[in-house]
Amino acid sequence: MTSIIILFLILFGISFIVTPSNAKYTLSGYNTASKEEQAKYDINKLVPYINRGIRITAIITLITSSIAYYFENKTIVAFCLSMIPMIGILITLVFGSLKYIDKKASTSNYIAYILILLTILLSLYLFIYHPDKINLDI
């Protein structure tokens, strides 16, 4: 249960740390972009959108992991602690970039999305076909 609470606190805490005023230091991609590229970002709408997405992801992770923990299902707890944050943050980033960035996604964005998606698919494969290899003491 400790790992569930720690992950929730980390995700929820991150959502309050990033603000539009410190985004130039904390947001990956935005902090390395030129001034012209940064002008394409609607940072005052993007950051609150990302923060809400991370908070929702943290709450969903907490609830689902706690339910799985209550029923003592180690595989589902491991799935909830690993997959839900990745899927939630990926969805938040993709839709946030489509909605609040005035440009097409760069090749590096597509590569990052594909790598995250492959990681999710590989993890799902392990959870579905090899749950006995997951070792999580609850």
Image (cartoon, rainbow, N blue to C red):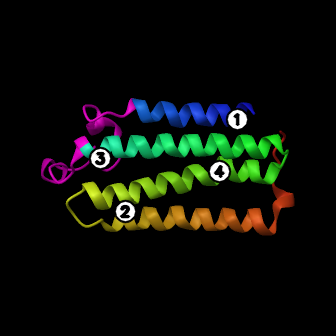
The amino acid type, in three-letter code, at marker 1 is: Ser
Q: Which of marks 3 and 4 is nearer the N terminus?
A: 3
Residue 50 sits in quarter: top left
The amino acid type, in three-letter code, at marker 4 is: Ser
Query: Which label sits in the foreground, 3 or 1?
Result: 3
Per the model, the C-alpha gap separating discs 3 and 1 is: 29 Å
The residue to which callout 4 is attached is 82
Expressed as whole percent of the image width and height from the top left, the position of residue 68 reads 77, 46
The residue to which callout 2 is attached is 109
Expressed as whole percent of the image width and height from the top left, the position of residue 111 reads 42, 66
Q: Earlier in the sequence, mark 2 or mark 1?
A: 1
Per the model, the C-alpha gap separating discs 2 and 4 is: 21 Å
Q: Are marks 2 and 1 in contact (CB under 8 Å)?
A: no
Q: Are marks 3 and 4 in contact (CB under 8 Å)?
A: no
The quadrant in which the C terminus is found is top right
Q: Taking 16 as reference, is 78 above or below it?
A: below
The residue to which callout 1 is attached is 3
* Dot 4: element: helix
Q: Do the residues labelled 3 and 2 touch (CB within 8 Å)?
A: no
The amino acid type, in three-letter code, at marker 2 is: Asn
